[in-house]
């Protein structure tokens, strides 16, 4: 009996995905100009970026990046513990801790690495990792790698989470949730989940990738908006490549948490540090995000404008008050067709299909940025109506 050929097996799975109309493909962007991208030789108005505050091309970030590259070079050359931790990294960690109201912060090279690192460091065999059904994939993968028992509760349903916690009363437990859900755009019931964790002695871990910079006082995120402290939610993870327009991620919490992660978060210990120039640029982004509140105010105006215009045109947006405004379509092929129709009209709005979203929940994921204008939003709404959504 011969062993299965792994590459052949993967090719079969790929063929099945193509047959189902779910095949993903990479598309290159040739140029970026504000809210516009050039793809396949066409200039398109993009509603697909997570650059919520419009900082990725900001001249101050560019200048900080270039200046730091002149001083520090391009790469960090080593992991943080082996000489890769430079002055810009230290300054950024201090700024992130101060912004989010926490004792300390620790940089990771990506949000995926941050969540996996935390869960593997904290959880062991026999522990319970309880997660929202719509959590990001990296939280799911982190729980699996940790060896803990993974249980998933009904999306945004604290009562469902309570039943799961009560079923394993003796196990050490961590409850992980997105702050803002990346595909639906809604905000987790953080106050209820924090109360639940206090009641059951569980640790609350919040992935605020899509909340940081956008929600809360000074843009400090969904936990600050909910009035929750470090004691209420001991583990905060957020990314630097969305509202902050840069790259990488951080975990913020108590000094004990951060000291422990330096020892036991393998994805931090064994990964080259982010380039110092990126850290320097991100430090500027944090300053802008904190103090230029007009960017968040503009974003809120655009969100209200889009939702009101969609309602007037009979377009079915999912309930969301964030910059992520999904237009539910259902069928994957129909969603792809609508995305192509919009592209022909000059708009880039990708179709999101299973397995990224549940079966029969394909959608157009419209994301807004402070770079957009109300006129741009109105044009998109007209294009959606013309495409017979």
Image (cartoon, rainbow, N blue to C red):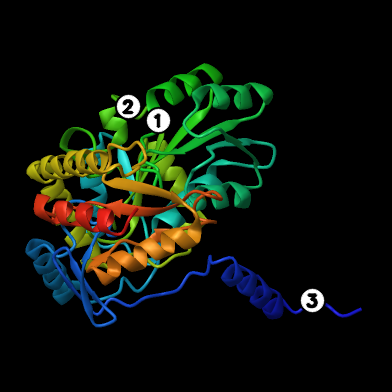
Seen from this angle, which residue lies furthest bottom? 41
- Front residue of this view, candidates 76 and 319: 319
How far, Cα to Cα, is label 3 from label 2? 51 Å
Mark 3 or mark 2: whose residue is earlier in sequence: 3
How far, Cα to Cα, is label 3 from label 1? 46 Å
Residue identified by numbered label 2: 229
Q: Position of residue 238 (x, y in %)?
A: 34, 47
Residue identified by numbered label 3: 4
Which quadrant of the figure has residue 352?
bottom left
| Residue at (48, 44) in percent of width and height | 135
| Residue at (44, 19) in percent of width and height | 195
Task: Sort mark 1 into few (<14), some (14-19) or many (20+) by Cα contacts within 10 Å.
Answer: many
Q: Pointer 1 and pointer 2: residues touching (CB < 8 Å)?
A: yes
Residue identified by numbered label 1: 233
Q: Is residue 57 left or right of residue 233?
A: left
Residue 110 vertical placement versus 76 (above, below): above
Q: Nearer the viewer, mark 3 or mark 1?
A: 3
Task: Label 3, secondary structure: give it.
Answer: loop
Q: Position of residue 19 (x, y in %)?
A: 60, 70
Q: Is residue 55 left or right of residue 50?
A: left
How far, Cα to Cα, is label 1 from label 2? 6 Å
Task: Label 2, secondary structure: give it.
Answer: loop
Residue 25 vertical placement versus 354 (above, below): below
């Amino acid at each position: 009996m011969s062993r299965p050929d792994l590459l052949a097996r993967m090719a079969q799975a790929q063929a099945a995905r193509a047959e189902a109309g779910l095949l993903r493909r990479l598309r290159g962007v040739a140029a970026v100009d504000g809210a516009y991208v050039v793809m396949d030789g066409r200039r398109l108005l993009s509603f697909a970026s997570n650059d919520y505050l419009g900082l990725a091309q900001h001249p101050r970030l560019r200048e900080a990046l270039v200046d730091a590259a002149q001083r520090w070079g391009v790469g960090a050359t080593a992991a943080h513990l082996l000489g890769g931790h430079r002055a810009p990294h230290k300054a950024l960690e201090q700024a992130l801790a101060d912004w989010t109201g926490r004792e300390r912060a620790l940089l990771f090279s990506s949000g995926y690495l941050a969540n996996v690192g935390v869960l593997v460091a904290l959880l062991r065999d026999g522990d319970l990792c309880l997660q929202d059904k719509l959590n990001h994939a990296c939280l799911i993968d982190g729980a699996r790698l940790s060896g803990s028992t993974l249980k998933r509760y009904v999306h945004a349903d604290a009562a469902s989470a309570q039943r799961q916690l009560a079923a394993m009363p003796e196990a050490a437990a961590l409850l992980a949730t997105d702050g803002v859900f990346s595909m639906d755009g809604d905000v987790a019931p953080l106050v209820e989940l924090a109360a639940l964790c206090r009641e059951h002695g569980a640790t609350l871990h919040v992935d605020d990738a899509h909340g940081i910079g956008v929600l809360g006082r000074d843009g400090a995120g969904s936990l600050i908006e909910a009035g929750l402290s470090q004691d209420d939610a001991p583990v905060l993870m957020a990314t630097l490549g969305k509202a902050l327009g840069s790259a990488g991620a951080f975990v913020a919490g108590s000094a004990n948490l951060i000291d422990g992660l330096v020892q036991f978060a393998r994805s931090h210990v064994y990964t080259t540090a982010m380039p110092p120039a990126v850290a320097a640029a991100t430090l500027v982004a944090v300053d802008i995000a904190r103090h230029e509140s007009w960017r968040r105010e503009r974003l809120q105006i655009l969100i209200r404008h889009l939702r009101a215009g969609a309602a007037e045109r009979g377009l079915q947006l999912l309930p969301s008050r964030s910059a992520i405004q999904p237009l539910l379509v259902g069928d994957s092929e129909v969603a792809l067709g609508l995305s192509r129709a919009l592209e022909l009209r000059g708009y880039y709005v990708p179709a999101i299909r299973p397995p990224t979203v549940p079966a029969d929940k394909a959608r157009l994921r419209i994301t807004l940025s402070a770079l957009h204008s109300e006129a741009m939003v109105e044009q998109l709404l007209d294009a959606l109506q013309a495409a017979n959504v």
